[in-house]
Amino acid sequence: MTIFFLLAPFSVLLALLGLWGFWWTVRSGQYDDPAGDAARILIDDDDAGPPALIQVRAREVDPG
């Protein structure tokens, strides 16, 4: 029975922590555009990268 007195407040505290986390994600805008995020991962970016990065990689391959 003594374990109940330890686990009951701990579970209430854990539930309040979960509710606070959910409240924080809603207030910070985590759920504003779920459709855009779902489509963004399907977009294929075949770009080689920015020109500066291409030049750096070219120097790494052929330093001369």
Image (spheres, rainbow, N blue to C red):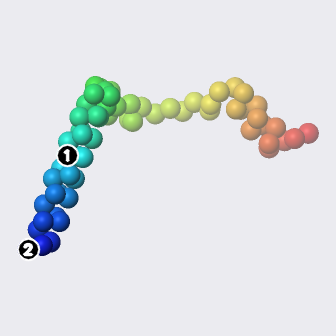
Residue 55 image position (x, y, % from top left): 76, 31
Does residue 10 appear in this view? yes
Given contact means CB atoms under 8 Å apart, are the residues at marks 2 and 1 in contact? no
The disc, 2 or 1, on the residue closer to the chain's N-terminal end is: 2
Depth order, front residue of 25/34: 25
Residue at image point 32% right, 28% down: 28
Residue at image point 23% right, 34% down: 23
| Callout 2 crowding tier (Cα within 10 Å): few <14, some 14–19, many ≥20 | few
Amino acid under disc 2:
Met
Quadrant position of residue 36: top left
Which residue, given by chain and number where applicable, does mark 1 sit on?
16
Residue 63 image position (x, y, % from top left): 87, 41
In the drawing, does residue 24 fall left or right of residue 10?
A: right
Depth order, front residue of 19/60: 19
Residue 62 image position (x, y, % from top left): 84, 41
Quadrant position of residue 46: top right
Depth order, front residue of 34/40: 34
- The label on residue 1 is 2
> Number of numbered discs present?
2
Depth order, front residue of 35/4: 4
